[in-house]
Amino acid sequence: LDLEEKILNIGSLSALVCVAFPWVSGEWLGGKHVTYTGLGFFTSFIGIAIVLLHLYVLLVTLIPLTGGPAIVQEKNKDGLRLFTTLLASALTVAAWSVLTKVSFEFRLEISFGLYGTLIGSLVSSLYSFLLFQEKRKHTSPDIHTYTASVPPPAIEPEDHRF
């Protein structure tokens, strides 16, 4: 794998793992201390979507490496990875905004799991964008190919008299 590909997968794996770490913790109503991961609390569906998106990005790379069939065609791989990592980053920011609003209303704090998920998602988005740009730079459309056109045969013999 290329260096960019490795960094993309490491970022995606770190975001995937950080979803299981605490996203919000603090004092809930009644003085009870609570800690919620990305798969619990108000943002559980967003956390599940982030897990599935990063799992897809990892499987696009890992299944062909282990000898399995390619999930996506090679020409579409970088574009789909860019789309999924950007979507995961947007969902992470959406979860951050929900948890920020909740943390203002209660005595809760944003924990390190959300920071790790955001950093991993942004790193994987950046490197999937770089791979997408590199792929676009190396593939150019075939607009400069010359194909000699043969004129159609004459239906009647031509008359060349003056």
Image (spheres, helix red, strand yellow):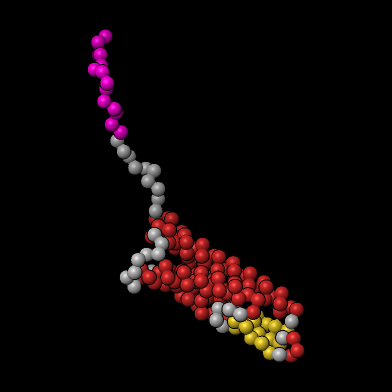
Say whether residue 150 is magenta: yes
Count of all numbered marks drawn on residues in the image: 0
Q: Quadrant of the N terminus?
A: bottom left
The reply, left or right, for residue 48 in relation to residue 81 is right
The structure residue drawn at horizontal position 25% and vertical position 14%, both measured from the top left corner, is 160
Question: On the image, which quarter does residue 24 sit in?
Answer: bottom right
Q: Is residue 70 visible?
A: yes
Q: Position of residue 2 (x, y in %)?
A: 38, 69
Task: Please state the extent of the stretch shown in magenta in the rendering.
Answer: 149-162
Q: Is residue 149 above or below residue 45?
A: above
Say whether residue 124 is magenta: no
The reply, left or right, for residue 108 in relation to residue 144 is right
Q: Position of residue 92 (x, y in %)?
A: 59, 71
The structure residue drawn at horizontal position 67% and vertical position 72%, both measured from the top left corner, is 97
The structure residue drawn at horizontal position 73% and vertical position 84%, both measured from the top left corner, is 107
Q: Position of residue 9 (x, y in %)?
A: 45, 72
Judge by depth and name the residue closer to the eye, 95 or 124.
95
Q: Quadrant of the C terminus?
A: top left
